[in-house]
């Protein structure tokens, strides 16, 4: 019997060579993937930084929420979903969180002259720190949610920058305003104390800022203005001074509270009304702080007569020939009189069109005749009149009634008459 032992020895040798080649290919591929990781991560970060830089700059042209006013509407707001690679060690919005380059983000030396909020820093493992310079109009700051509002996060009198470490993250930023400074506030808080440039941050309580909204209110004893007081530092920047006792006084009018205690934002508010005309000065005082002053003007309250009725004929021409009202005034003043209403047009053939003519009298004094040349509601100024405090009477009539079958019926609809 014939045996071919050479063929048997050859098969295992080919298999060994094949496995060695496969192993070499896998090793080369693994090395390639390992070396490709950092460039891919860097490209991902650079693309997102370009989008952030453009978006932050565009935000600056939008509406900024006034931090002094607790009732101000939300400022220009944008949400960003950051896809952060595993190799990212940190990304910081507004400042370098590791200025001494020792890899520790929580040991920034006190008193260091840091960035001013117009930068983004990030670092990938094995790479150097990357600086993204933003437009000079952009100032990023970290926010903290307290008392139902987002406000700048202040630690030891220093405003902070937002630091994110590890994992993809959605971050919302809002444009806010504070005593002349506009900046972009994060709706996210971290556990790293990376502070913004000290000479542009909130310091120790120094004074009081008083704002009144609206700054003009009718002096009717009912309509109120909101008086808000904010603790500020020597730079005029808000300070989060909680439970600060503030005493209020006014030159006239009625404050709903003459003492307020500040909330976690260092602010508080109350209302003021007045039945007296003129400028009202409100003063806020607190021990150890400079006084704050705010102003509100109490204006002549309007008097509105709501008739919502037709005048169908001229005086003496039948029913519905006038509208009248008695009223009382609290102030001596010059009043502007305005009628709101509309009319119907009617005229003789070959004659020009003619609308209803309105006549207003106060205490028997004629203010003048005004044509109501509109079939839809319009405001018609009817003159000015000096009136004293006390009781008065108002009379509205139509002077040119016209009612001819088949030709037309001229009438006047009076919605309101306002004295202001």
Image (cartoon, rainbow, N blue to C red):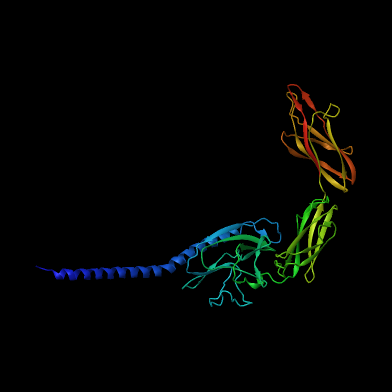
One can see residue 420 in this view: no
One can see residue 376 in this view: yes
Query: Residue 209, located in which quarter of the rendered image?
Result: bottom right
Front-lying residue, 231 or 403: 231
Q: Number of labelled discs?
A: 0
Can you give x and y, in whole percent of width and height, for residue 252 in the image?
85, 58
Quadrant, the C terminus: top right
Can you give x and y, in whole percent of width and height, for residue 278 in the image?
84, 54
x 67%, y 60%: residue: 148
x 40%, y 69%: residue: 34
Q: Residue furthest front?
A: 1
Q: In the displayed structure, does residue 364 sit left or right of residue 293?
A: right
Query: Residue 55, located in which quarter of the rendered image?
Result: bottom right
Q: In the displayed structure, does residue 223 sit left or right of residue 91?
A: right
Front-lying residue, 169 or 217: 169
Q: Residue furthest left?
A: 1
Can you give x and y, in whole percent of width and height, for residue 265 in the image?
70, 64
Quadrant, the N terminus: bottom left
x 58%, y 74%: residue: 106
Q: Residue furthest top?
A: 405
Q: In the displayed structure, does residue 360 sit left or right of residue 23?
A: right
């Amino acid at each position: 019997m014939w045996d071919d032992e050479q063929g048997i020895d050859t098969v295992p040798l080919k298999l060994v060579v094949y496995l060695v080649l496969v192993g070499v290919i896998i090793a080369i591929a693994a090395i390639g993937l390992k070396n490709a990781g950092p460039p891919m991560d860097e490209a991902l970060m650079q693309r997102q930084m370009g989008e952030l830089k453009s978006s932050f700059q565009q935000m600056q042209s939008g509406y900024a929420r006034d931090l002094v006013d607790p009732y101000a509407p939300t400022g220009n707001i944008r949400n960003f979903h950051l896809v952060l690679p595993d190799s990212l060690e940190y990304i910081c919005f507004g400042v370098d969180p590791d200025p001494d380059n020792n890899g520790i983000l929580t040991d920034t030396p006190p008193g260091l002259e840091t960035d001013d909020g117009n930068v983004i820093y990030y670092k990938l493992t094995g790479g150097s720190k990357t600086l993204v310079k933003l437009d000079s109009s952009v100032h990023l700051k970290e926010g903290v949610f307290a008392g139902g509002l987002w406000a700048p996060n202040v630690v030891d009198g220093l405003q902070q920058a937002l630091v994110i470490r590890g994992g993809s993250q959605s971050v919302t930023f809002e444009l806010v305003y504070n005593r002349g400074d506009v900046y972009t506030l994060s709706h996210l808080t971290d556990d790293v104390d990376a502070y913004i440039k000290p000479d542009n941050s909130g310091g120790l309580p120094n004074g009081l800022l008083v704002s009144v909204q609206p700054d003009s209110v009718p002096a009717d004893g009912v309509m109120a203005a909101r008086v808000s007081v904010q603790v500020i530092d020597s730079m005029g920047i808000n300070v989060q001074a909680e439970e600060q006792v503030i005493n209020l006084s006014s030159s006239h009018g009625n404050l709903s509270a003459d003492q307020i205690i500040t909330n976690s934002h260092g602010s508080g508010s109350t209302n003021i009304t007045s039945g007296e005309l003129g400028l009202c000065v409100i003063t806020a005082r607190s021990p150890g702080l400079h006084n704050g002053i705010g102003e509100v003007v109490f204006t002549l309250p309007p008097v509105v007569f709501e008739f919502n009725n037709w005048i169908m004929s001229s005086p003496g021409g039948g029913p519905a020939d006038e509208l009248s009202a008695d009223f009382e005034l609290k102030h001596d003043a010059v009043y502007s009189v305005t009628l709101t209403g509309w009319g119907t047009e009617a005229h003789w053939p070959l004659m020009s069109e003619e609308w209803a003519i309105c006549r207003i009298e106060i205490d028997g004094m004629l203010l003048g005749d005004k044509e109501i040349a509109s079939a839809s509601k319009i405001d018609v100024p009817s003159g000015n009149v000096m009136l004293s405090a006390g009781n008065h009477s108002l009379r509205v009539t139509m002077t040119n009634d016209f009612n001819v079958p088949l030709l037309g019926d001229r009438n006047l609809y009076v919605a309101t008459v306002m004295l202001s």
